[in-house]
Amino acid sequence: MCKYRRNDAGECVEQGNINLLKNNLQPEFVNIREPGDQKGSTPLHIAAGYNNAEIVKLLLKTGANINAKDKGGLAPIHNASCYGHIQIIDILIENHCDIDSVDEYGYSALHEAAAGDHYEVVLKLLQNHCNYKLKTKDGQTAYDLCNRFGMISPQILDGSYLLDKLFVALKEGNIQYFSKYLNPINANLRQENLQS
């Protein structure tokens, strides 16, 4: 039996108390919804939102549902994307989360990252072949959401972000730089598409 009450798992995650979780977490408690949490979050939702990579790994190793949805339809990848937690995004993608999961309003992780101008997350999601054409229930793409505020994410989503530098890196054979910024949107653009 777990040494802590069932509703303490989320509190341990919030506080980053990995030792208590390591010693006591049992698979039957790893996906429990916190009774006091109106959102219906699981410990994995909380750990993703708090950017606690070690706890995310522990929860996944113990059997946490990587695609669990809260009452609003948010999955852990939404929480990490909303706050720009790139390390958590990496872990979730490596563990085969549904990268295109949408909430009750049709928002995907890409929508969340683009709206928050978390361009590293936007790039990571694109490089892992998320569907950048998804629309919210209001008919907005991720590009539409971020384009309103003069952010850098629209340049990523229209393919123009660092495209000139990508061509230079390619010509110089700098594969590390080239692969860091290459994504499905800019992969097929031509240098003449740059109109600055």
Image: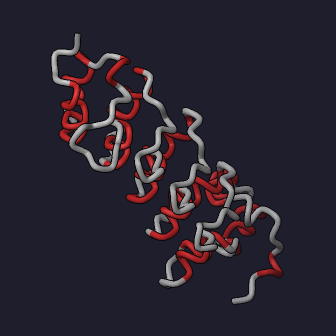
**x then y, percent, for residue 149:** 48, 83
Left or right: residue 27 versus residue 122 is left
Q: In which quadrant will I find the N terminus?
A: top left
Q: Residue furthest bottom?
A: 196
Q: Residue at x 68, y 56 (%)?
A: 131
Q: In which quadrant will I find the C terminus?
A: bottom right
Depth check, front residue: 92 or 182: 92
Q: Is residue 195 above or below residue 159?
A: below
Left or right: residue 141 versus residue 8 is right
Q: Residue at x 51, y 38 (%)?
A: 67
The scheme the figure's colours follow is secondary structure
Depth check, front residue: 126 or 139: 139
Q: Is residue 144 above or below residue 35?
A: below
Q: Residue at x 24, y 30 (%)?
A: 9
**x then y, percent, for residue 182:** 69, 59
Where residue 19 sits, quadrant-wise, is top left
Where residue 12 sits, quadrant-wise, is top left
**x then y, percent, for residue 156:** 62, 70
Left or right: residue 176 versus residue 51 is right
Q: Residue at x 83, y 81 (%)?
A: 192
Q: How many marks?
A: 0
**x then y, percent, for residue 6:** 22, 25
